[in-house]
Amino acid sequence: MTLGCAYHDTMVGRGSSGGGGDEPFTGRAAIGYDHGYDAEVFYLGLALDPHYVDGFVEGCLERIGEDYPEEELLFRDLWEDETQREVVIESLKAACEVRTGRPAGL
């Protein structure tokens, strides 16, 4: 098991998904994390929810970091620069299925 997998398994095992260091994501951020990490899907209907987007980005970066830690670090550096966030989101969405609307139940 890689470090990224261990992190994900620990955070998901606690009842919600990863994020924010030692604090698990909750609510829409947890949904976004799961979509980025496990499902590799982005819902356009949630694109304006900053919690969903933050969770999605974190989930994607955790998944990427398992196989490509240097690429994860590059994306994290870009994400820290607020002028580059849209570039990061678009790059991560390009590697996922993009769906219109929202998932059932939201």
Image (spheres, helix red, strand yellow):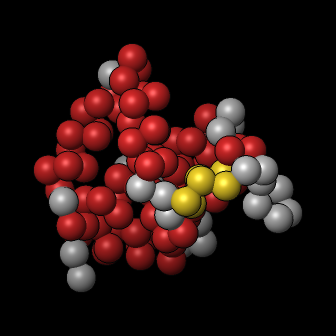
Residue at 56% x, 42% y: name it: 53
Q: Give 56 or 22, whichever is nearer the viewer.
A: 56
Vertical position of residue 12 compared to residue 31: above or below: below
Q: Give 19 or 52, whichever is nearer the viewer.
A: 52
Q: Evaluate whether residue 26 shows in this view.
A: no
Q: Is residue 65 left or right of residue 101?
A: left
Total numbered labels = 0
Residue at 20% x, 49% y: name it: 71
Q: Quadrant of residue 63?
A: bottom left
Vertical position of residue 57 compared to residue 49: above or below: below
Q: Is residue 14 left or right of residue 6?
A: right
Residue at 18% x, 60% y: name it: 68
Q: Quadrant of residue 50?
A: top right
Counting from the top left corner in percent of width and height, residue 90 is at 45, 38
Counting from the top left corner in percent of width and height, residue 56 is at 52, 50
Quarter of the image with the N terminus in it = bottom left
Quarter of the image with the C terminus in it = bottom right
Q: Quadrant of residue 4?
A: bottom left
